[in-house]
C-alpha cells in the first residue's frame, strides 16, 4: 500500500503523509469505512502519545471525523493499548492512536483499531487508504444537523488503570523495588501509578515529557538507562516502555537487559505450567532467535512463525485460538486479556510470574540458550524487490546452502523507514561475523547508501 506500512501510517511530522491535510482525510475515510447504521456507534476514540505534533494531528483528525458525522472522544496522552481497550469497552466504531512508537519526536503516525479493539486487517486498511487518496470518491457532506461533536474523557485513565490491574488479578507487589522508565512517552503518568497502587516501591524515570524528548536516550530503545538505575538503587528489575507503551523491555537485578525472546520463552513456559497456553503453542515472528525455537521444542511447545509486526502475531493467535505470542522487540500478546501488544499489562504478567515462583527475572530467563546473532540496519535510497538484486540474491542462496539447520539469514526492508535490515544467526559466532560482513558489502554495492 502507498500509505500503510507494518504498523499503520508513519512518517516525518508536517511532511506527507503526516500532515494536517492527510489527517483530516483519514478522519473522513475512517468515517466512511467504519460508520455503523444509526447513530449509536458512530463514536471514535482518538488518543496520542506525547509528541508535540500530536496536537496538530489530533485537531485535524477530529475535524475530519466530526465533519463526517462522527462523535470524537479525546482522552489525551494514553498508551496505544488503552485506546484499543477504550474503543471496545465504549462501543465505538473505531479507535485511532497518534504515535510513531519508538521513533524520535520528529516522526508521528496513525494506528487504527476497529470496533473489536483489533488493528484493521489488510483489506480494511486498503479501503481506508483508497478513501484517503480519493480513489473511492468523496462522500457527500453531511447536513449541519448531523455534524458530530468532540468530547474530553475525564475518566479514561482510571478506566484503563483498573482494567490493567484486573488482568493481573490485582497481584500484590509488596517487597519489590522496580525502576520504571516511561521514555517520556504515553505511559509517563499511569505506569508508575499502577505499580505503586499494587504495592511496589517505584523509582520512576522518563516521566517528564516536553513534546520533544520522547525516546531520547531512554525507554525501550535504551534499557541501559533503567539498568543503571537498577544497580544504583538495588532494585529487583527495570521496566522500560517505548513511546506508546505497547512494547516493554526488562532489565534484571544486575541491570542487564533481558532479550525479548527470553521473555517470550519464560512466559510460554509459565503459561503452560498454569494450563493457560492453549494448544501448547506460541506465535512469534521471523525475527525470533533459533534458540527460542529449540527451547520450545524441548518443552513440547509448538512455535508458529509469522511476518514481522505484532498484528500478524495477533492474527495467527485469533485464527488458531491460541493464547500467547509476541515479538522479540518487546511486543507481548496475552490474548486472553488484550487485543494488541500492551507493555504495562505484560509487565504485570511478568511480575506475577516472578511472585508465584519466588524467583528473580534472571533465574526465570535462564530457560534458553540464544544463538549468536547480529542485526544491522543500513539506510537505503530506494527499496527495489530483493529478488531483483542479483548479487544479494546469490549471496542469500549461498548462505542458506552453507548454514543448513545450524543458522539462518533474514534480509528485509523496514516497513516504516528507508532501511534494509540484515539479520544473521548461527551456532558459531565467527560464522555470524563473516556472513554479516558479506551481506553488508553486497548491499552497499547494489543499493549504495541513502
Image: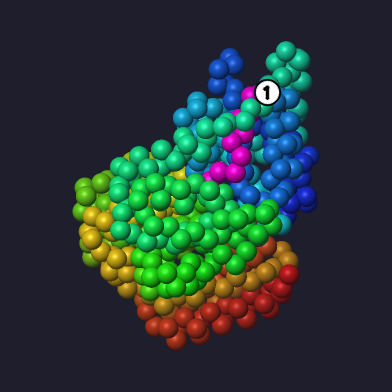
On whether residue 300 falls in the magenta region, the answer is no
Q: In which quarter of the image is residue 431?
A: bottom left
Relative image position of residue 136 (x, y in whole percent): 72, 31
* Figure quadrant of residue 175: bottom left
Identified at 60% across, 70% down, the residue is 377
Rendering coords of residue 12 (x, y %): 73, 54
Relative depth, front residue between 37 and 412: 37
Give 316 or 369, whichever is nearer the viewer: 369
Quadrant of the image containing the C terminus: bottom right
Q: Which residue is drawn at 41% across and 77% down?
A: 372
Residue 64 visible to the viewer: yes
Q: Which residue is drawn at 39% across and 83% down?
A: 428
Left-right relation of 64 to 243: right
Q: What element carries label 1?
A: loop
Q: Measured along the vertical axis of the image, is residue 89 above or below residue 264?
A: above
Q: Is residue 344 above or below residue 236?
A: above
Residue identified by numbered label 1 = 149
Give the left or right position of residue 252, taking residue 105 as reference: left
Is 74 in the magenta?
Answer: yes
Q: Position of residue 174 (x, y in %)?
A: 31, 54
Which portion, as a residue range, is magenta? 70-79
Quadrant hosting residue 354: bottom left
Dot 1 crowding, Cα within 10 Å, few <14, some 14–19, many 20+: some
Q: Where is residue 435 in the image (x, y as percent from the top left)?
A: 51, 81
Amino acid at each position: 500500500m502507498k500509505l500503510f506500512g507494518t504498523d499503520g501510517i508513519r512518517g516525518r511530522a508536517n511532511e506527507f503523509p503526516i500532515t494536517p491535510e492527510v489527517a483530516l482525510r483519514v478522519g473522513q475515510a475512517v468515517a466512511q469505512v467504519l460508520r455503523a447504521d444509526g447513530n449509536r456507534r458512530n463514536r471514535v476514540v482518538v488518543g496520542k502519545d506525547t509528541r508535540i505534533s500530536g496536537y496538530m494531528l489530533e485537531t485535524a483528525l477530529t475535524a475530519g471525523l466530526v465533519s463526517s458525522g462522527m462523535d470524537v472522544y479525546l482522552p489525551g496522552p494514553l498508551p496505544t493499548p488503552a485506546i484499543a481497550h477504550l474503543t471496545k469497552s465504549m462501543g465505538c466504531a473505531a479507535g485511532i492512536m497518534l504515535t510513531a512508537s519508538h521513533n524520535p519526536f520528529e516522526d508521528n503516525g496513525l494506528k487504527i483499531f476497529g470496533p473489536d479493539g483489533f488493528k484493521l486487517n489488510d483489506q480494511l486498511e486498503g479501503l481506508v487508504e483508497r478513501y484517503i487518496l480519493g480513489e473511492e470518491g468523496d462522500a457527500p457532506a453531511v447536513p449541519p444537523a448531523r455534524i458530530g461533536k468532540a468530547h474530553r474523557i475525564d475518566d479514561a485513565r482510571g478506566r484503563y488503570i483498573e482494567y490493567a490491574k484486573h488482568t493481573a488479578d490485582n497481584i500484590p507487589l509488596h517487597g519489590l523495588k522496580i525502576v520504571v522508565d516511561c521514555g517520556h512517552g504515553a505511559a509517563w503518568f499511569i505506569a508508575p501509578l499502577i505499580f505503586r497502587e499494587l504495592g511496589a516501591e517505584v523509582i520512576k524515570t522518563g516521566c517528564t515529557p516536553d513534546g520533544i524528548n520522547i525516546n531520547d536516550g531512554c525507554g525501550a530503545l535504551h534499557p541501559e538507562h533503567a539498568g543503571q538505575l537498577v544497580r544504583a538503587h538495588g532494585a529487583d528489575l527495570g521496566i522500560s516502555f517505548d513511546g506508546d507503551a505497547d512494547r516493554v523491555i526488562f532489565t534484571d537485578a544486575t541491570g542487564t537487559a533481558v532479550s525479548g525472546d527470553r521473555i517470550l520463552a519464560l512466559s510460554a513456559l509459565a503459561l503452560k505450567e498454569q494450563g493457560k497456553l492453549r494448544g501448547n503453542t506460541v506465535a512469534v515472528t521471523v525475527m525470533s532467535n533459533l534458540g527460542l525455537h529449540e527451547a520450545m521444542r524441548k518443552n513440547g511447545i509448538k512455535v508458529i512463525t509469522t511476518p514481522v509486526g505484532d498484528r500478524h502475531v495477533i492474527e495467527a493467535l485469533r485464527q488458531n485460538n491460541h493464547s500467547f505470542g509476541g515479538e522479540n522487540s518487546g511486543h507481548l500478546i496475552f490474548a486472553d486479556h488484550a487485543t494488541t501488544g500492551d507493555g504495562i499489562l505484560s509487565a504485570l504478567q511478568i511480575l506475577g510470574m516472578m511472585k508465584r515462583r519466588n524467583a528473580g527475572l534472571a533465574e526465570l530467563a535462564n530457560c534458553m540458550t540464544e544463538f549468536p546473532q547480529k542485526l544491522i540496519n543500513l539506510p537505503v535510497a530506494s527499496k527495489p524487490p530483493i529478488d531483483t538484486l542479483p548479487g544479494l540474491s546469490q549471496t542469500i542462496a549461498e548462505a542458506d546452502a552453507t548454514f543448513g539447520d545450524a543458522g539462518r539469514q533474514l534480509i528485509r526492508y523496514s516497513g516504516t523507514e528507508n532501511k534494509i535490515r540484515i539479520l544473521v544467526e548461527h551456532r558459531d559466532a565467527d560464522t555470524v561475523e563473516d556472513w554479516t560482513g558479506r551481506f553488508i558489502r553486497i548491499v552497499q554495492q547494489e543499493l549504495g547508501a541513502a
